[in-house]
Image (cartoon, rainbow, N blue to C red):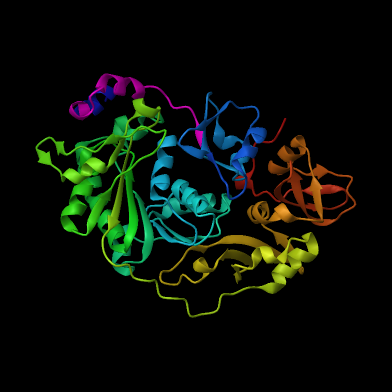
Amino acid sequence: MKIEELYSRYQSIIPDFKIFLEYLQIPLYPSFRVNTIKVAPEKIFNLLKELKLTPLKFYSEGFSLNQRFPLGNHWTHQVGLIYAQEIASMIPAIILEPKPNETILDLCAAPGSKTTQIAQLMKNKGLIVANEVNKKRISGLIHNVKRCGLLNEVVISLPGERIGNILPDYFDRVLIDAPCSAEGTIRKSRAVLYHWGLKNIQKMSRIQKGLIVSGFKALKSGGTLVYSTCTIAPEENEGVIDYLLKKFPEAEVLPITIPGFKIRAGITHWQNESFDQRVKMCSRILPQDNNTAPFFVAKITKRGIPHLRPGFQGRIEFNERIIENLYRRFEIAKENFSNYAIFQRQNAFFISTCEVYSFFELPCIRKGLELGWIYDDVLKPDNDFIQIFGKGVKKNFVEIEEWELKRFLSGESIRTQSSLDGFVVLLFKDLPIGVGRINDKEIKSTIKPSRRIKSPE
């Protein structure tokens, strides 16, 4: 199928349809956001000095490139300092406006782009429940939440349609980045041309209606729900919002404004169907307006009196021995950990927010971030943990050059003149990168194979 054939059904709702088609055939330049959990945006220019970066006007943590470049292979991406993400894909989390210490549900979380973005907007505090029903995609979700250093996440795996009945009126905010027919991915991949069909759109629409009903039930009164897709089909966009409004009189559409980013109003008529006039406040993102992928976003609230989440009656576990071990070895201030839970699961120690630790309402696959492991009474800190908490390291650290950094991240050992031995924190340009082990003037890398960059020549 040709691009013109697939998208011709939308000619009546896109006034500048010819320009729309032209943009669909232009591949996108890469874009990314800085992971502020690990690094400040102003530091990224120095770390990506070989690239031409343009800050996004509407989002201080986002950047685009003016060149083709495999961002996912760059060392800053591998260690979680940046997250390669299409510009329009950043919009739903921004519209959600998550706040620290809130309780948030990401109903369809894999691969974790929006989960990790929400977490950093929350300043890694509170609780975000990341749900993914597809077992094959959970490993990718866990890889990304760990790479980005999330302390406030719980990963679960349930059919999204069930959660609203299990946890009604529970979450301050809910994101539903729904599975869809993916028409908007055409600028990244032509695969949609080979699997697109009206039956698939109708199937997706049924799934989406079940998900938005569940998400709305799970939302507290006065809370915010954001629904998004990367497709153009009204059946999966305005049609789904119209369905919600008809089913729940307490549902209300909220206006969306993004200074510096052009959006178009939702449509109220499609083929032989008319939608609730309030869907005009939904947002259509078209490629020709901001040079992005097509996207759809709706912002919903629930009228009513909010119910408080029941308080946790148990004890928040805090393993003081592990924190003492960190202080003795690296002199990382103990007060850095005063508002967290420190607990053991199997052979690993974890750190999380207290809200994460106290979440027992659903079976969890993962909570918080690995802090480290004990080997022969010696603590080996986790690399992602040390990138967050190692910024205050005062002893047993080694400063390295860029060529040494790349050897370490590729899994190779580094020769050193340091008189230290045992586990040390490696610093590059004042940033803690990871943990190495010095033995006989050699720093052995602890980077796992799945996180290694290509070996330098």
Quadrant holding the C terminus: top right
Query: For the point 68% across and 48% down, which residue is it?
Result: 447
Report x, y in % for residue 345. Answer: 58, 69
Report x, y in % for residue 364. Answer: 46, 66
Quarter-of-image position of residue 284: top left
Q: Is residue 138 magenta?
A: no
Side (left or right) of 281 relative to 259: left
Count of all numbered marks drawn on residues in the image: 0
Q: Is residue 14 magenta?
A: yes
List the single residue furthest toward the left.
272
Q: Which residue is nearer to you in this view: 155 or 122?
A: 122
Quadrant holding the N terminus: top left
Report x, y in % for residue 69. Answer: 55, 28
Find the magenta span and give its range. 10-32
Q: Which residue is nearer to you in this view: 400 or 355?
A: 355
Side (left or right) of 267 relative to 273: right
Report x, y in % for residue 59. Answer: 48, 39
Query: For the point 27% across and 54% down, which residue is it?
Result: 212
Query: For the point 62% across and 44% down, which residue is it?
Result: 40
Query: For the point 64% across and 56% down, which residue is it?
Result: 385
Side (left or right) of 135 relative to 454: left
Vertical order, 158 against 58 (above or below)? below
Question: From this viewpoint, is residue 192 visible?
Answer: yes
Question: From this viewpoint, is residue 107 visible?
Answer: no
